[in-house]
């Protein structure tokens, strides 16, 4: 006789829009409370989350916070984590490869527990699967609730527009691999790090891959015409670039070039990728 495996409960997901003060402040961050009376807090957001999350939890009566899970450590996702970790006496969990990003933005230097792809996290009668999805940052993770086939995507997916894959922390090669991994999954609902929940998005990851591949081919074609620099590629690729978007555009081009270099298509004459002379591989 075999004991029946108890059915997993669908997890309740409450989204709290936490305003942020950073350069990407047009859209609040989606902080997510996973579970009902035993919960995970995913991406508590900027400092505003320190008050907003407890206010949301207070209406539920007795709640045990098991852990704070961070998709990555950009300040608009993570700044509220240390204060909430202290308040609830719970660990903060994140991908160990986030260390270089964390050092840049946050003043706590230890990970309470690592979040690694393949882990299963039990909470409130259900569970979340941890998916390693590097690219936006080196240790970015996404969380998948299997019963409702819901992806908590962090900054892997944008509510609108595109996600920043910005050199040096952003790695285009990793981002492509992460998109391909998710393309192979049955996902009915996506909660992005910012913006509206996407329901049954038709081949969203395929579209993301296509858009990035088109951009990559344009860059490869420009480099193919003769040795060139990021400065020279910039106006060709973005003819109507707003001054405030310049820095991100430069970092995006370098991220594409770095991928092309790692794949053997182009070479740089210097380790200073922003100022190197780029040419097609012989
Ligand atoms: Zn981010």
Image (tube, rainbow, N blue to C red):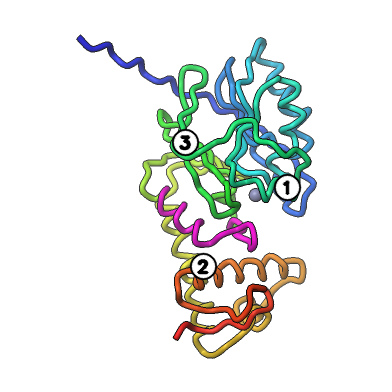
Marks 1 and 2, the one that precedes in the sequence? 1
Whether residue 152 is situated above or below residue 9 in the rendered picture: below
Whether residue 175 is situated above or below residue 44 in the rendered picture: below
Image depth: mark 3 or mark 1 in front: 1
Whether residue 44 is situated above or below residue 124 in the rendered picture: below
Q: Please, which residue is most extreme toward the left here?
A: 1
Q: Position of residue 167 (x, y in %)?
A: 63, 63
User: Cα distance, mark 1 to mark 2?
Assistant: 24 Å
- Mark 2 surroundings within 10 Å by alpha-carbon count, few (fewer than 14), some (14 through 19), many (20 or more): some
User: Cα distance, mark 3 to mark 1?
Assistant: 27 Å
Specify the label residue 144 is tagged with. 3
Specify the label residue 259 is tagged with. 2
Q: Which residue is mark 1?
A: 103
Q: Residue at x 70, y 39 (%)?
A: 78
**SS under mark 3:** strand
Within 8 Å of ligand 1, the CB of disc 3?
no
- Mark 3 surroundings within 10 Å by alpha-carbon count, few (fewer than 14), some (14 through 19), many (20 or more): many
Quadrant position of the N terminus in the picture = top left
Give the magenta-colored segment's residue range.
162-182
Whether residue 160 is situated above or below residue 220 in the rendered picture: above
**SS under mark 2:** helix
């Amino acid at each position: 006789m075999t004991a029946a495996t108890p059915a997993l409960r669908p997890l309740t997901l409450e989204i709290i829009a936490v305003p942020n003060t950073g350069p990407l402040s047009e859209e609040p961050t989606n902080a997510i409370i996973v579970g009902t009376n035993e919960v995970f807090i995913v991406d508590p957001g900027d400092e505003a989350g320190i008050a907003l999350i407890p206010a949301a939890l207070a209406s539920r009566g007795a709640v045990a916070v098991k852990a704070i899970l961070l998709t990555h450590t950009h300040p608009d996702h993570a700044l509220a984590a240390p204060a909430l970790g202290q308040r609830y006496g719970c660990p903060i969990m994140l991908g160990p490869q986030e260390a270089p990003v964390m050092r840049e933005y946050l003043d706590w230097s230890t990970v309470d527990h690592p979040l690694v792809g393949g882990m299963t996290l039990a909470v409130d009668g259900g569970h979340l699967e941890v998916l390693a999805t590097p690219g936006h940052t080196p240790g970015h993770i996404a969380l998948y609730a299997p019963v409702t086939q819901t992806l908590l995507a962090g900054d892997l997916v944008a509510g609108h527009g595109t996600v920043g894959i910005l050199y040096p922390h952003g790695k285009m090669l990793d981002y492509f691999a992460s998109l391909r991994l998710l393309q192979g999954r049955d996902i009915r609902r996506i909660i992005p790090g910012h913006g509206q929940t996407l329901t049954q998005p038709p081949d969203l990851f395929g579209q993301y891959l296509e858009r990035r591949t088109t951009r990559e081919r344009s860059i490869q074609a420009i480099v193919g015409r003769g040795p060139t620099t990021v400065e020279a590629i910039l106006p060709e690729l973005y003819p109507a670039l707003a001054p405030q978007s310049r820095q991100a555009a430069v970092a995006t081009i370098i991220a594409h070039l770095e991928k092309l270099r790692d794949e053997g298509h182009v070479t740089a004459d210097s380790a200073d990728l922003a100022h190197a002379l780029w040419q097609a591989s012989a």
